[in-house]
Image (spheres, rainbow, N blue to C red):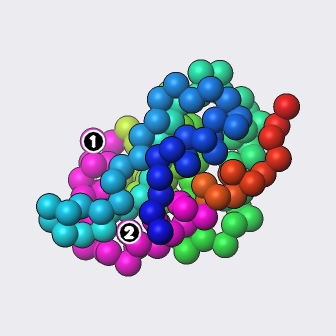
Amino acid sequence: MSIQSTQAIQALSRFGNVSWFKLPAEYNPFYDYPQVSYMGWRYTSPREEVAQLIDDILRKLPTQVEWTLDRTRRNWLLVPTRLLREAHGLADPSFSNVVHSINVSDPDFCRNSLSDLELIIQKIQQVSIIE
């Protein structure tokens, strides 16, 4: 089963207008390996209660890897915590190098992150809408 961008956008749009969205490919056919999953987006009018709701989902959901909702920048990023830890945060230029390193060296982690992200998106689709 694969994550569809439209499913993710629909889930996130339940809580506000998504003005920007990125979901990297889950598989690199050129190099023949799975890629670590993460998702970034921006709400036109971000709301703290939406961030809290997503944080609650991440705390309660039985995922295979640890996840973080990073809001330190303009875009929100739902990312495996390992990426932030190994890259020393999003601002570090090594972030893309860390992503690439995990992609080529740890396919199990990449598959687990994909499975987790699908589960997280399903849960976001199911939770009650915040008014």
At numbered mark 2, what does the secondary structure look like: helix, strand or loop? helix
* Percent of width and height locating residue 31: 15, 65
Residue 102: tell me if it is visible: no
Does 114 lie within the magenta span? Answer: yes
The three-letter amino acid code for the residue at tag 2 is Cys
* Percent of width and height locating residue 124: 68, 51
Tell me: residue 128, above or below residue 44: below
| Residue at 42% in and 58% down | 37
Secondary structure mostly seen in magenta is helix
Q: How crowded is mark 1: few (under 14 residues within 10 Å), some or many (20 or more)?
A: few
Q: Which mark is residue 110?
A: 2
Q: What stretch is highlighted in magenta?
A: 92-119
Does 84 lie within the magenta span? Answer: no
* Percent of width and height locating residue 118: 55, 62
Tell me: residue 12, above or below residue 35: above
Label 2 vs label 1: CA separation?
Answer: 21 Å
Tell me: residue 77, above or below residue 25: above
Quarter of the image where one finds residue 83: bottom left
Quarter of the image where one finds residue 92: top left
Which of labels 2 and 1 is toward the front?
2
* Percent of width and height locating residue 33: 24, 69
The three-letter amino acid code for the residue at tag 1 is Pro
Residue that numbered label 1 is attached to? 93
Pick the front one: 23 or 109: 23
Asked whether the beta carbons under mark 2 and mark 1 sit within 8 Å of each other, the answer is: no
Q: Is residue 10 left or right of residue 128?
A: left
Q: In this view, does 34 lie to the left or right of 118?
A: left
